[in-house]
Image (cartoon, helix red, strand yellow):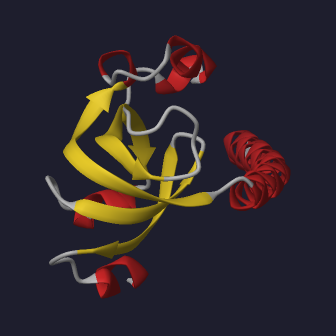
Amino acid sequence: MFLAVNVWQIVLIVLAVIAVILVILYFVGSKLQAKQANTEKTMKQMSMVVSLLVLSKDKLHIKDSGLMKQVQDAIPAYMRWRKFPIVKARIIKANIAGGAQVMSFICDPKVFKVMPVKTEVKVTIAGIYITKLHSAKGVDLSKLNK
């Protein structure tokens, strides 16, 4: 009898701890969702459509990507070990000072899958992030909507 009471007490304590953890995760998740929505809104405001000649694409660690030092330092430490979809491209037509130049861009994973290499594409960029593929020769853009 004494052993059965202790088992029920332990079960109740475990359930209470699990309930507290779930409540904390709910509030942290809602805060992260709001932050992501704000980031997407900012990216839409600063986006522009450009024409690029894609030279290469690969998944690379941020230190091997060829991105500027300021960008590499801005990546959180817990994400530096991860590989990012990086596209090296020459900017052809844009309202960017400096004319045609080769740059490295971080690409959205959905766009990265269908991005052709050695082809001129029209994309939307926000800073150094490729967010949308508008047109490219030989690419079925209906894959992006899935």
Q: Left or right of 30: which side holds 133?
A: left
Q: Nearer the viewer, residue 45 or 38?
A: 45
Residue 105 location in percent, x, y? 42, 40
> Left of 121 or right of it: where is 43?
right
Q: Measuring 15% from the left and 78% from the top, which residue is drawn there?
A: 138
Q: Nearer the viewer, residue 103 or 75?
A: 103
Which of these two is toward me, 103 or 28? 103
x, y percent for residue 54: 25, 49
Viewer-closest of 112 and 30: 112
Q: Is residue 87 visible?
A: no
The reply to whether residue 45 is visible in this rendering is yes
Place of residue 52 in the rendered image (x, y in percent of width and height, measured from the top left): 35, 53
Give the number of marks. 0
Residue 3, quarter of picture: top right
Q: Quadrant of the C terminus?
A: bottom left
Is residue 10 shown above or below 63? below
In this rendering, the answer to whether 50 lies above or below 107 is: below
Query: Which residue appears at 29% of the width and 18% of the height?
Result: 64
Residue that sits furthest to the bottom in the current view: 142
* Residue 30 image offset from top left, x and y in percent: 81, 57
Q: Is residue 29 left or right of residue 145?
A: right
Residue at image position (32%, 87%) is 142
- Left or right of 72 in this view: 105: left
Q: Residue at x 34, y 75 (%)?
A: 135
Res 101 quadrant in image: top left
